[in-house]
Amino acid sequence: MVNATDSKQRIARLQERLREQAVDGAIFVYPTDVFYFSGTRQNATLWIPADGASILFVRKSLERAREESLIPDTRPFPGSREFPALFDKNIRRIGLTFDVLPVQYYQYYAGLLQGLDFIDISQINRELRSIKSPVEQEQLRQSGRIFSEIFSQVPAIFKPGMREVDLAAEFEYLLRKAGNASTVRMRAFGQDIIGLAVAGVSAGVPGCFDGPVVGKGILKNMPFGSSTELIRSGTPILIDYPGIFSGYIVDMTRMFVYGTLDPMFKEAFDAALRIQDWVTANLLPGIISEELHLGALRIAEESGFGANFMGVPGEQAKFIGHGVGLELDELPVLARGFKYPLQEGHVIAIEPKFVFPDKGSVGIENTWLVTSGQCEKLTDLSDEIVYL
């Protein structure tokens, strides 16, 4: 998934940013970041100096790390007395990813490296990771192709009388058989989800997950996703899952209905398609991400469903799109306040959805690659509602 060329280029770009900020090096502990630069997700700590060669310190498994790592100097994690001696005396400022680093880990490294200053490089790291290399782009295309094929099989697995959880189980069976990873990695604290197949009333239930459609779920300590409610005739069925077939995530939503759909839902769904069309027509390098969010809000208001856009009224998600990659919630975010110019190589899931309490939800989601011209749809399957 990570080749030697990508690893070297990623480290070189990080080192350049570190030098610009007068940071002497960076310590990465968060597994996804360690993997991004080194090619292994073993339990390890990665040291990348602003100048010079990186070192991967491995706790477990050293054997697998040495097989997988693209860092030539991959060694066992040293004892607490030996660790400080590995750092040059001229190193004074060390970057850490404060966005994901537990306080306990911070205190551990601050104790080992006493007298040094620790600098937050979370934004630098996430910006670097947001630009997908040609190799990453092809891995995302692969995920999109497989995922689209699985969504096309929904009519074959649906049976009248199913519960939401039954449909979710059949869908997830197809995912796993196709090689989908079981873990959806997210950077946001406390945000967990596998995906959801929801229908009717439970699709309009508010919840803790930071997304427009949350689902009722089954347990109070996991209050999101599919429930044990029956899928009733005439209610919109929304299936929203991430697909992870190459290690890289694509995000996708499609609509289905068993029976006849209320015209209100069809009207709201058509508005979601108009929003998607407008956003993707403007998904170009140099466009400010906030502008796409504001434009989507305008179209939603013009449709007459503005109060239901992106969530239960009063509890809407504050974005229209989010970056995807090794994690589900990468940069850029298409949201108010994110004055972030899009760049070629950004990969963004765009998900205009409308939520109607006590009735249901409709919407669409596709994953798109920002190119030098027209953006590329990576989840290339018809967007239309499928009648079962």
Image (tube, helix red, strand yellow):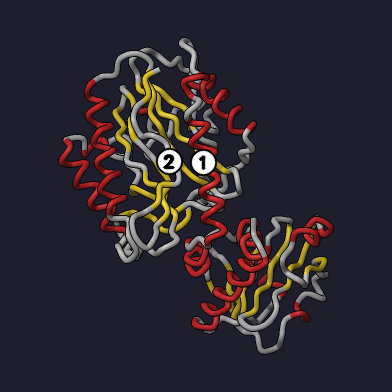
Q: Quadrant of residue 98?
A: bottom right
- The reply to whether residue 182 is visible in this rendering is no
Residue 224 in sight in this render: yes
Relative to 44, 259 lies left or right? left
Tag 1, which secondary structure? helix
Label 1 crowd bin: few (<14), some (14–19), many (20+), radius 10 Å: some
Tell me how far mark 2 sits from mark 1, CA to CA.
7 Å
Instruction: Determine which residue is flagged by label 1.
Output: 145
* Quarter location, residue 5: bottom right
Tell me what residue is drawn at x 74 percent, y 68 percent. Answer: 56
Q: Residue at x 33, y 54 (%)?
A: 335
Residue 234 percent location from the top left of the image: 33, 15
Say which residue appears at 68% left-offset and 64% top-offset. Answer: 38
Tags 2 and 1 touching, CB below 8 Å: yes
Dot label at residue 380 = 2
Sequence-wise, the earlier of marks 2 and 1 is 1
Q: Quadrant of the N terminus?
A: bottom right
The amino acid type, in three-letter code, at marker 1 is Arg
State whether residue 229 is above or below residue 286: above
Q: Nearer the viewer, residue 370 or 361?
A: 370
For the residue carrying disc 2, how many other residues have a C-alpha within 10 Å: few (<14), some (14-19), or many (20+)? Answer: some
Q: Position of residue 324 (x, y in %)?
A: 48, 51
The residue drawn where x is 51% and y is 21% is 167
Task: Specify whether 257 is left or right of 216.
Answer: left
Q: As displayed, is residue 50 above or below residue 90?
A: above
Decide which of 195, 370 is in the foreground and name it: 370
Does 55 sit above or below residue 92?
Answer: above
